Image (cartoon, rainbow, N blue to C red):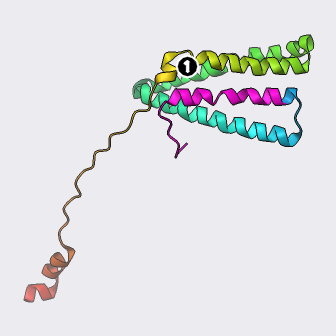
Amino acid sequence: MMRWKPRRLLLAGTLCVFPLAAPSAALAVPLPVAGLAAVMFVSGVAIEVFGVSWMTAMHQEIPEEKLSRVSAYDWFGSVAMVPLATALAGPAESAFGRGPSLWGSALLVVLVTAAVLFVPDVRNLTRRTKEVTVLPAPRVADPVASTDAESPAGRLG
């Protein structure tokens, strides 16, 4: 992400949430360990791209004096439903079976992520370019001339 700087931050980040459906789907298939490792690696990279894009957008759009509070609400919103989802995973597996529950989880990720793309600001928010002001270099006295004047030879001559 230090080299790739997507112009539309939230669009790029949201598109990188779709691969988070892959681990559930891979477990539902089920894939061998090497396949699972590859899927997990790709989804890990994708979530990092999302995270960097999201944090860049937050730093760009939220005034500095409000960033801490907004980040706290953001984090709360991100993890608030995890206990409920975890509590429902067991009953879902009992009611529908492991495979269908995993496919349902993957489908839920895809549907919710697709719904986010219907928000115009998510699709249209663009990265602001930083304007860099180039200051003129400070004037430095010629070191040879100042050294000669201060040396004993310079005082004698």
Q: Amino acid at mark 1?
A: Tyr
Instruction: Report the magenta residues as a range.
Output: 1-26
Please tell me which residue is depicted at 54% across the width and 33% down the height of the picture: 53
Image side of residue 86 versus residue 128, left or right: right
> Could you tell whether 70 is left or right of 80 in the image?
left
* 18 left or right, relative to 4: right
| Residues packed near mark 1 inside 10 Å, few (<14), some (14 to 19) or many (20 plus) | few
Q: How many marks?
A: 1
- Quarter of the rendering containing residue 15: top right
Say if the magenta span includes residue 120. Answer: no
108 above or below 52?
above
Where residue 63 appears, as percent x and y from the top left, is 40, 25
Q: Residue at 55% across / 23% down in the picture?
A: 72
Which SS does the magenta portion mostly show? helix
User: Which quadrant of the figure has residue 54?
Assistant: top right
Farthest top residue in view: 95
Task: Identify which residue, 109 or 151, lies in the foreground.
Answer: 109
Q: Is residue 78 visible?
A: yes
Name the secondary structure under disc 1. helix
Percent x, y of residue 76:
61, 20
What residue occupies the far left of the structure in this picture? 157
**Quarter of the C terminus within the rendering:** bottom left
Examine the rendering and report whether any part of residue 86 can be seen: no
Q: Residue at x 73, y 40 (%)?
A: 41
User: What percent of the width, then of the height, locates residue 133?
Assistant: 28, 45
Which quadrant holds the N terminus?
A: top right
Dividing the picture into quadrants, the one containing residue 84 is: top right
Q: Which residue is mark 1?
A: 73
What residue is drawn where x is 66% and y is 16%? 112
